[in-house]
Image (tube, helix red, strand yellow):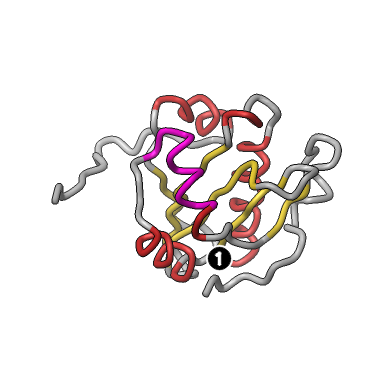
Amino acid sequence: MSRTPSRPGPSAERTSLPHGYSMLEAPPTSAEYVRMREVTGLSPRTPAQAGGALDASWAWTTVRDPDGALAAMGRVIGDGTWYFHLADIATDPAHQRQGLGRAVMEDLIARIDAAAPPEPYITLLADPPGQSLYRSLGFVDSAPSLGMRLPR
């Protein structure tokens, strides 16, 4: 289970969300997670994979629209002390261009800053659609390091 309680996030007061939207420190449901990855063009995941992501993440932030539907999400994977990796930052296409992704990012970063000792190592893999947002939040290329993966 996620290690963060289901309550409004710490940035709910300082981050301006569109009228009627709400921010929570809670994961989406498994079905919502699978759907959000699909509609945003992220690689597809099975419900079993979703379960691992939902249960083993250090933190989640979700944004719900006025009807309670998932509009945006993001999570942090990490050890809670020095290493934090932002993942699954996604906004439903029907809710994009309203600042929801920025609000999710700002909330997760604020939570890392509040919990971690000085100088935490915060990483993410930046797909092209999110790169300008991440740069605007202060992220820089990790050169000379290079993100790598082991294909299976």
Q: Is residue 34 magenta?
A: yes
Circle 1 sits on which residue?
A: 116
Task: Point out residue 138 in the picture as x, y percentages from the top left corner.
Answer: 54, 35
Number of numbered discs on residues: 1
Q: Position of residue 112 (x, y in %)?
A: 58, 59
Sort mark 1 into few (<14), some (14-19) or many (20+) by Cα contacts within 10 Å: some
**Secondary structure beneath disc 1?**
loop
Q: Looking at the picture, how far across and down is residue 136, in whole percent? A: 57, 29
Q: Which residues are magenta?
A: 32-42
Residue 51's place in the image compared with 66, above or below, is below
The structure residue drawn at horizontal position 73% and vertical position 58%, both measured from the top left corner, is 9
Q: Is residue 12 above or below residue 92?
A: below
At x 46%, y 25%, the residue is: 129
- As shown in the figure, which amino acid type bears the numbered disc 1? Ala
Horizontal relation, residue 125 to residue 144: left or right: right
Q: Is residue 5 magenta?
A: no
Whether residue 8 sits left or right of residue 97 in the image: it is: right
Q: Residue at x 80, y 43 (%)?
A: 66
| Quadrant of the image occupied by residue 42 | top left
| Residue shown at the point (45%, 64%) measured from the top left | 82
Residue in the foreground of this view, choosing between 68 and 2 = 68
In the image, taking residue 20 as reference, residue 118 lies left or right, namely left
Residue 114 figure quarter: bottom right
Q: Which is the main secondary structure of the residues drawn in magenta?
A: helix
Q: Position of residue 36 (x, y in %)?
A: 51, 43
Q: Quadrant of residue 21?
A: top right
